[in-house]
Image (cartoon, rainbow, N blue to C red):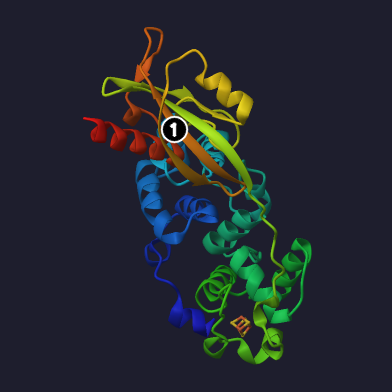
Amino acid sequence: MAWFDDHARPLPWRTQTVSPWESLLAEIILQQTRIETGIPYWERIRTAYPNPAVLAADTEENLLLLWQGCGYYARARNLYKLAQELEGKPLPKTYDALLKLPGIGPYTAAAVASISHNQPVACVDGNIRRVISRFRAKHMTDSQLQKEASVLLNTTRPGDWNQALMDLGSQICTPRNPKCNQCPIEDNCMATKSEDATEWPMRRSTKQKQIQAAALVIGGEQGMRLEAREGRTLGGLWGVPYAEGKAAIQQLLNGREVKEIGQLRHDFSHKKLHVTVYSANPSVSDELREPESVPLSTLDRKILELFKVHQSEES
Ligand code: SF4
């Protein structure tokens, strides 16, 4: 705790007085987004939606417009559902009640309950998993880690304790080259007795599939043909006509005179996309929209950027 008191990262949701709702927004955004990228999203979203009732009164699409580029859009859709489920009531304070809300897992429930309400519940995120596994020099399952984190928890300052472990993991006990000689728990850390502290925790295998895809840009300055995306990854967003896999690509390109304009790569956590981008002139049946008027994914913004560059090279 002494180390944290001296070295806590000056994050905006720590240096200002923030509500439990704003703390929840920070936790949800930081689950899968780097801090530097997440801060402007947090500022933007908390300003637009200072409490859940304001969000519930708006549309999901407007939230997605603010969220675009932050990735993992299921988080935004769940946040919207959560705001609606609260029906104007404030966020619950306890771990158990928070856990029942859409999109709130054990980590987020524990973070909000401990940081905003001083409830003695331990968080386990990637940083804490690494610190505890090394501290005990033990490969542990998720439930063993949760138990161990609960045993170690400082119940007087649980919120600060959880944040201290997160900071220790991100600043000192880093995935590669941990700075053990600067670490406040070095004397008791079992990993330092081994040759290589990075042996813990066990690496989770995240095999990404390689996927061939095609995107078709129809339109131009007069607007673009945009379709509502479906599915868990990009549902709720809009994008240009798009297909993955040979048969679907053929179907996408059939029946129009298309021109290949370039290729790009895009990674999701579970797949690596190799996208060939085509363009075509709109037909009378194509409904064209202004891309700025709807939430687009980063992938679609890359596709439109490539199209724009191609257009300017042509003219
Ligand atoms: S002593 Fe080294 S391995 Fe152990 S917790 Fe600290 S930084 Fe990590």
What residue lies at 44% left-to-right and 54% top-to-bottom? 19
x, y percentage for residue 287? 39, 14
Front residue of 134/276: it is 276
What residue lies at 69% left-to-right and 65% top-to-bottom? 203
Q: Splitting the image into four quadrants, where does ligand 1 fall?
A: bottom right
- 37 lies left or right of 243: left
What residue lies at 45% left-to-right and 75% top-to-bottom? 8
Image height check: is 79 above or below 259? below
Figure quadrant of residue 282: top left
The C terminus: image quadrant: top left
* Count of marks, rendered view: 1
Secondary structure of the residue carrying tag 1 is strand
- 11 lies left or right of 78: left
Decide: few, some or many residues near mark 1? Use Cα within 10 Å; few <14, some 14-19, many ≥20: many
- The residue where tag 1 is placed is 277
Q: Amino acid at mark 1?
A: Val
The furthest residue to the left: 315
- 258 lies left or right of 293: right
x, y percentage for residue 39? 39, 56
The N terminus: image quadrant: bottom right
x, y percentage for residue 94? 63, 54
What residue lies at 54% left-to-right and 42% top-to-bottom? 273
